[in-house]
Amino acid sequence: MNKIFVLGSMNMDMVMQAERLPLAGETIRGTGFFLNAGGKGANQAVAVKRSGGALKFCACVGDDVFGERLINTLREYEVDTENVRTIDGTSSGLAQITVVNGDNRIILYGGANECVDAEVAERFLAEAAKGDIFLTQMETAPAVVLRSLETAKERGMQTILNPAPAQNFSSEMLKFTDILIPNETEAMSISGKTDIEEAALALSERVKEVIVTVGAKGCICSRGGSVSVCPCPQVRAVDTTAAGDTFCGALAARLGMGYSMEESVGYALKAASLAVTKRGALQSIPSENEVLNG
């Protein structure tokens, strides 16, 4: 089994539920609120672990009550926190999430996530062996993402990039990416195309494998000039917060266990569809047993 190295963010999610989004200058009543450990890096790491993958995780948190809670939550999910650093004098990353009818809108504050630098990434990846898998996202500094992808390729790893949020994306990253997993909005933003299949095709000219997640419709896979649509199980969505991260982590875990791309995509779609049936981020991510027998 190949190890999965996840480098990324940890945030405390402040989740507000409402019947609709407020207009500019308007105040409305929420229907629910909770604090939730999350962040794309943490979500994907827990998804790898819950899917049976051999996980290594690297991130930074602040020296505040949120940082302590984030680390303790990882330990509850049996994630090794050896490479999770606490940064003195810095607040932990935060995410303000508004959930309306199962869909979410997110505003991020990086905090300690900005302290994940190239030196930290290179030291973390020094443990990797040829054939291991590197999974990362865009909630750490763009220069760090680029350098970590390059370092991973130098070590003979298979690289997976989830380019979210896409505002900080650089096309230079594609040189060192084997599998690109954007959502529909990100794929069109990165490619400059307004049609999703055209976007997937354009990106596959630069990356070996492109998988565009398209919510309840499943995903669009593109490789070598061909495009295929992979549907996912239909469920009643309650909260989509960690669906994409569940897909990424589950896919990486199955690839690391030796499953084919087709088998791994099928598993990841089912895992993501189960995740949206529960509220929250980490607590919504299903176990391998739930995916295989659910």
Image (spheres, rainbow, N blue to C red):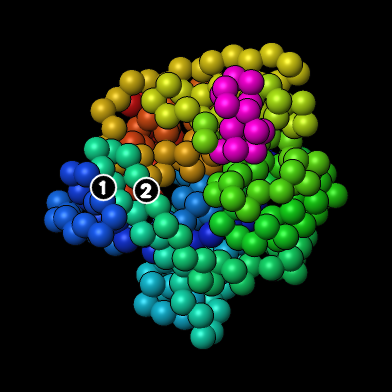
Quarter placement of the C terminus? top left
Image position, residue 99 (x, y; %): 28, 46
Quarter placement of the N terminus? top right
Classed neighbour count for the residue bearing mark 2: other residues with Cα under 10 Å, few (<14), some (14–19), many (≥20): few
Q: Amino acid at mark 1?
A: Leu
Position of 216 with respect to 193 (left or right) is left
Q: Residue at x 36, y 59 (%)?
A: 96
Q: CA distance from mark 1 to mark 2?
A: 9 Å
Q: Residue at x 42, y 33 (%)?
A: 272
Which residue is at the front of the view, 264 or 243? 243
Depicted 112 relative to depicted 179: above or below: below
Badge 1 or badge 2: first in the primary sequence: 1
Q: Residue at x 46, y 50 (%)?
A: 43
Which label sits in the foreground, 1 or 2?
1
| Residue 75 in view | no
The residue carrying mark 1 is 21
Position of 234 with respect to 154 (left or right) is left
Residue segment shown in magenta: 186-199
Image position, residue 33 (x, y; %): 21, 58
Position of 236 with respect to 281 (left or right) is left
Q: Residue at x 78, y 46 (%)?
A: 172
Magenta-colored stretch includes residue 190: yes
Image position, residue 264 (x, y; %): 57, 27
The residue carrying mark 2 is 105
Which residue is at the front of the view, 178 or 214? 214
Q: Quadrant of residue 53?
A: top right
Image position, residue 181 (x, y; %): 60, 36
Depicted 68 relative to depicted 183: above or below: below
Which residue is at the front of the view, 205 or 231? 205
Residue placed furthest toward the front = 25
User: Magenta-highlighted stretch: main secondary structure?
Assistant: helix
SS at mark 1? Answer: loop
